[in-house]
Amino acid sequence: MTRAQIIKKEFVSFLKKHKALKQYKINVYNYMKGINRGRWEYYIFPISQFSHNGSKTMLIDGAFRWASTPQGHTFWEELSHKWRTYINNIQL
């Protein structure tokens, strides 16, 4: 399994565990509508995205404008913090 595949698997599992996968997909889709024809996979999981150390955190931090989602800025900020802690603990 490649590093990108491992990160993708861990990220999807993390979102499922926090019951946020569906909301995440919807928010990315809405944000990216018209770009990449709304295919959320193109935005979240390009292989090149995982070539830089900081890119793992950007999966939440840079995915969409948190304040413009139904869940709000605080929800995504807290989830982002949990994701950063998680990836640091498992040393991805």
Image: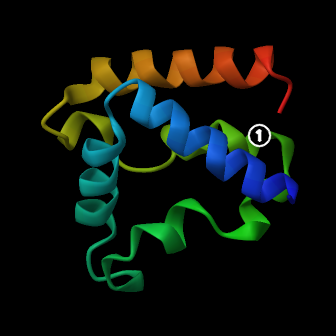
83 shown above or below 20: above
- Residue 12: x and y in percent read 52, 44
Decide: few, some or many residues near mark 1? Use Cα within 10 Å; few <14, some 14-19, many ≥20. few
19 shown above or below 60: above
The quarter holding residue 4 reads bottom right
Helix, strand or loop under label 1: helix
Of residue 14 and residue 50, the one placed in the foreground of this image is: 14
Q: Amino acid at mark 1?
A: Gly
Q: Quadrant of the C terminus?
A: top right
The quarter holding residue 67 reads top left
Residue pictured at 64% horizontal, 48% vertical: 9
Residue pictured at 21% horizontal, 28% vertical: 72
Q: In the displayed structure, does residue 81 sit left or right of residue 18?
A: right
Residue pictured at 66% horizontal, 69% vertical: 46
- Residue 59: x and y in percent read 56, 45
Q: In the displayed structure, does residue 70 sit left or right of residue 85?
A: left
Q: In the displayed structure, does residue 51 sit left or right of residue 77?
A: right
Q: Tally the marks.
A: 1
Q: Quadrant of the N terminus?
A: bottom right
State the scheme by which the image is colored.
rainbow
- Residue 78: x and y in percent read 42, 15
- Residue 73: x and y in percent read 28, 26
| Residue carrying label 1 | 54
Of residue 37 and residue 6, the one placed in the foreground of this image is: 6
Residue pictured at 36% horizontal, 43% vertical: 21
The quarter holding residue 56 reads top right
